[in-house]
Image (spheres, rainbow, N blue to C red):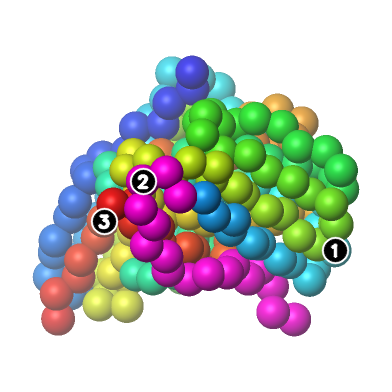
């Protein structure tokens, strides 16, 4: 069974701080996605990384795919209260695009 | 476009009762998925479908059945609900013909089994 472990599970920080969330697996994925989920809603895609070593930036968010395509990180610079939510990584496996989801990181940014 | 919709939004069942969760998408997507979300466990795939009339088991299929009679609808059934099936259920859909596919999620159905 492929597993994706995220760390930390919970993170509470002050507005303006930086943070990094990690997503690790022993399996290789063809691509990796990051989703953000707000309370009472479904996850919404933030980014997809496909190539080992790939770095993508989305405003203050920086996503990196590991060289071996087994891990990924999400770095947020100068966090804002609007960044609060559950962050989920998901690795794509197989032709049917089944996603293996990570365990999630719950981020709270205090004003 | 409404995207992915789910009904009902919330339901309370007694152990042994049955129910059907409905997922509908208006994006002409080929693939549809049912997940359950439990604290500390992320989302786990229950069943999925790669086209009308086809279904397949995911990671945690026991106690659930599905049907995809129409392309736009994917139904999840619980024949005899158990407290262990208390969870938040999400439906998702995606285009089936691109190499890297975004899954679009519905707002979820919160199910409590007493």
Q: Secondary structure at mark 3?
A: strand
Whether marks 2 and 1 lie on the same chain = yes
Tell me the chain of label 2: B
Q: Which residue is mark 2?
A: B15
Q: For the image shown, how many numbered marks are present on the structure?
A: 3
- Left/right of residue A30 with respect to residue A22 in the rendered view: right
- Residue B66 sits above or below residue A82 on the image: above
Label 3 to label 1: alpha-carbon separation: 33 Å
**Quarter of the figure with the C terminus of chain A:** bottom left
Q: Residues within 10 Å of mark 1 (few under 14, many from 20)?
A: few
Label 2 to label 1: alpha-carbon separation: 36 Å
Label placed on residue B28: 1
Q: Position of residue A54 (x, y in %)?
A: 56, 42
Give the magenta range: B1-17
Residue at image coords 66%, 68%: B4
Label placed on residue B61: none
N-term mark: 2 or 1: 2
């Amino acid at each position: 069974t492929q597993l994706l472990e995220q760390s930390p599970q919970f993170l509470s920080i002050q507005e303006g701080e930086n943070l990094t969330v990690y997503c690790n697996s022993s399996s290789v994925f063809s691509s990796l996605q990051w989703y953000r989920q707000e309370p009472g809603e479904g996850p919404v895609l933030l980014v997809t990384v496909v190539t080992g070593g790939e770095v993508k930036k989305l405003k203050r968010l920086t996503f990196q795919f590991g060289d071996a395509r087994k891990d990924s990180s999400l770095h947020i610079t100068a966090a804002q209260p609007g960044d609060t939510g559950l962050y989920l990584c998901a690795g794509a496996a197989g032709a049917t695009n089944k996603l293996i989801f990570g365990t999630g990181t719950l981020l709270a940014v205090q004003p | 476009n409404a995207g992915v919709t789910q009904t009902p939004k919330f339901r309370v069942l007694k152990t042994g009762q049955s129910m059907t969760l409905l997922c509908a998408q208006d994006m002409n997507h080929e693939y549809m998925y049912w997940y359950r979300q439990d604290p500390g466990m992320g989302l786990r795939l229950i069943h999925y479908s790669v086209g009308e009339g086809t279904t397949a088991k995911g990671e945690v299929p026991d106690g659930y059945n599905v049907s995809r009679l129409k392309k736009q609808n994917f139904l999840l059934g619980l024949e005899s609900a158990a407290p262990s099936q208390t969870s938040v259920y999400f439906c998702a859909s995606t285009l089936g013909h691109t190499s890297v596919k975004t899954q679009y999620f519905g707002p979820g159905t919160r199910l409590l089994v007493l």
